[in-house]
Image (cartoon, grey):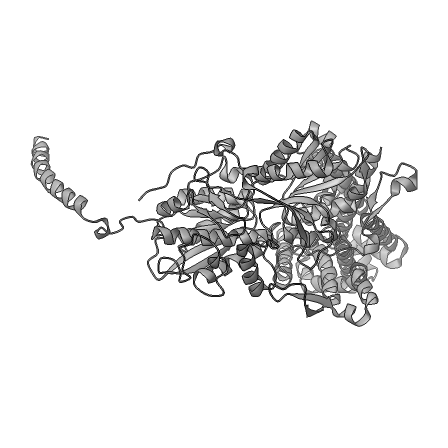
Amino acid sequence: MDSILIQILNGLDKGGAYALIALGLTLVFGTLGVVNFAHGALFMLGAFVSVTVRNILTISKKVKDESITFFDAYKETPYLEIWWGDTGAMIIDYAVPISILVAIPVMLLIGLMMERGLIQYFYKRGDADQILVTFGLAIIIQEIIKANYGANPIPTPAPDIVAGSASIGAALGLGESLVYPWWRLIYLFFSVTIIGAVFAFLKYTTFGMVVRAGMHDRETVGLLGVNVEKAFTIVFGIAAVVAGLAGTMYTPILPPDYHMGMDFLVLSFVVVVVGGMGSLGGAVAAGFLLGILQSFASMNEVKSIIPGIDQIIIYLVAVIVLLVRPRGLMGKD
Amino acid sequence: MTDDIKKFGTLSRRGFLKASVAGAVASSAPMFFINNAHAYVNAPKGKTVTLGFNVPQTGAYADEGADELRAYKLAVKHINGEGDGGMLNTIKPLSLKGDGVNGKKVAYVTGDTQTKSDAARSSAKRMIEKDGALMITGGSSSGVAIAVQSLCQEAGVIFMAGLTHSNDTTGKDKRKYGFRHFFNTEMSGAALGPVLEKEFGKDRTAYHLTADYTWGWSQEGSIKKYTEALGWKTKAAVRTPLGAGDFSQYITPVLNSGADVLVLNHYGKDMVNSLTQAVQFGLRDKQVNGKDFQIVVPLFSRLMAQGAGENIKGIFGSTNWNWSLKDAGSQAFVKSFGAEYGNPPSQAAHTCYVQTLLYADACQRAGTFDPCAVIAELEGHIFDGAGNGPTEYRADDHQCFKDVLVVRGNQNPSSQFDLLEVVQEVPRKQVEYPASMLGGELGSCKAS
């Protein structure tokens, strides 16, 4: 029982990341009709907002390390700690949560610039052009990050207070052995909250109504005097924020590197296809479903029956869905 | 037809005489009168010799690669007579004088293996074919080392392996042109086994998470061999992709598996990530089978300990060398490296530095850069003063035999670099094994 619960939780926290990226991809595809291959790069940029904030907070003074006698060695002490002591150390410790506040305006701005500066010129072009330009943009963003931050993953830890594990077994009366890392639980809660917020925004606001109407029939909504183009530009910005926040929060789970967006993009496209192109609910459901399937496929009991299944399960499901239900789980004909 | 025979017969008689005379003159003349006598790949023509440093500058082992490159550059400086000379002052015997090798200064080219075999081979090929590299060295992955070693054998260029720990490098995949100073998984198992027994007892159940390539398989096999010999049981051995990043899906099945020891057959950033995540999942706080749950990292390095931070404290492993050793060779190297870069060297840096000096010294002793002559000098070479006590480059498999360190993550570090505590210096005789045990054939040298 404990094993199954742990695998479900593990699948849900992985699925949370897949769902958040897939949600943004689907929003952009559903509104603008663009298959945005640069969407993974937005996830990566969000993660690097976190790295940048931490780098800024830890700007340090070099102090000679007297404990080393063989050669001159230096310790780096952040100015925040020098100036404010424990308070400064606590601010550095909370670099990732602070990054969330920074990531929202930064990612919104990047999203708007990306859409206005480049992608809007390709709305009326063919799919091949859109794919080429967005894929090229993703590579350019990747290389800019690589040139500035190097090619290696950069550890970005969670605050100490949530660095350990939560005894969820004890809390649920299932025994003390059932524990799960706090930050992964927070990530799961965070993804569900963001997904809920996006759905609520689309369902309960006038702007959301315009967007949903535009997704169904852009021309008619335009004829009613609504500036659909402006609304869809904002949608692009929202999608960038969602992807960016997913990346920012993911940094304590996986130290970010310049290539992480591409790794997640491939999986997220599979999620979108399985969920049904253009279906927001489908993207979210497929994200969590594939996360859980991937987690269960990693169990030794499963791998003893089908060796290597953990590596291919997501693609296997995609192939089956495309064969049996080409429009995806929740897609429409 | 008749004419042809007649012509052939006439020419044959005269030709035979001419050829005989020419052959006699040629065979009696000194070889150096003949153009390209003893020609070998990338024979140096100018005042410099070029070495190829092929290290991972990106990928899961990039931290080790960066430190390897620093060590190579320092070795070149010392060979050319710059700096304080480092181990040139301690290695014995040594023919190098700090004025280059065989009257030529050493230059180098670098490449990025990306921790991928195909990229590493392309990079090594480029260095041999375009940059004229006379020797290739590097690698922080056994998969890469084996692939490049094989390429070097085909090309007739010596490969001085950097950090490669799989038995196969000097076992089933050994090559005449390949040499390894670093220890291997068999030695790690032989060194760690008795310490694990002393610390954790004989009644343990282990769960292995293993990097899915030659090194991981080799280490898993060696640790299983030595722990099962103690009486430990192996619950499962699960393969994980190199560079997986998020290992949570592999760690969660450990939680309720009934195992009370997790053996992480991971290295570099993979090890940092898997260990950190294992600790996050509460493994170090668990009690299983009435015992404290333990984590073992059979191949340890200070760079990894640095990356893993607090999580590494108290964890056992083995290492080829550590900067805290007090012998003259280690101290000379640490002083030079520290003065140059502000950090003590890692074990990867140490092995790469020593390999470069050993190669240069073998060329100097041979009086030539001809690989066959250099190989002959390296085979069976016995030396001291390089940080691991008396060491022998065994001729049968080109594996160095020396003392091995068992270490533990330091609970009370005295400085920012004092992350590993040396628990035991395991003597060479405890980790030595017959060359035939790991199989393989060296092959032959392409004599010119």
- Nearest the viewer among B316 and B62 is B316
Q: Does B156 sit above or below residue A93? A: above
Residue drawn at (10%, 34%), measured in percent from left and top?
A: B4
Image spot of residue A179 (x, y percent): 84, 42
Residue drawn at (42%, 46%), measured in percent from left and top?
A: B378
Task: Give the quarter of the figure containing the C terminus of chain B.
Answer: top left
Quadrant for residue B220, please give it: top right
- Nearest the viewer among B148 and B420 is B420
Image spot of residue B248 (x, y percent): 74, 43
Q: Does B286 sit above or below residue B45? A: above
Residue A5 visible in the snapshot: yes
Most extreme residue toward the bottom is: A83
Image spot of residue B232 (x, y percent): 70, 31
Task: Give the quarter of the figure containing the N terminus of chain B.
Answer: top left
Q: Does A258 sit above or below residue A1? A: below
- Nearest the viewer among B280 and A261 is B280
- Nearest the viewer among B349 and A253 is B349
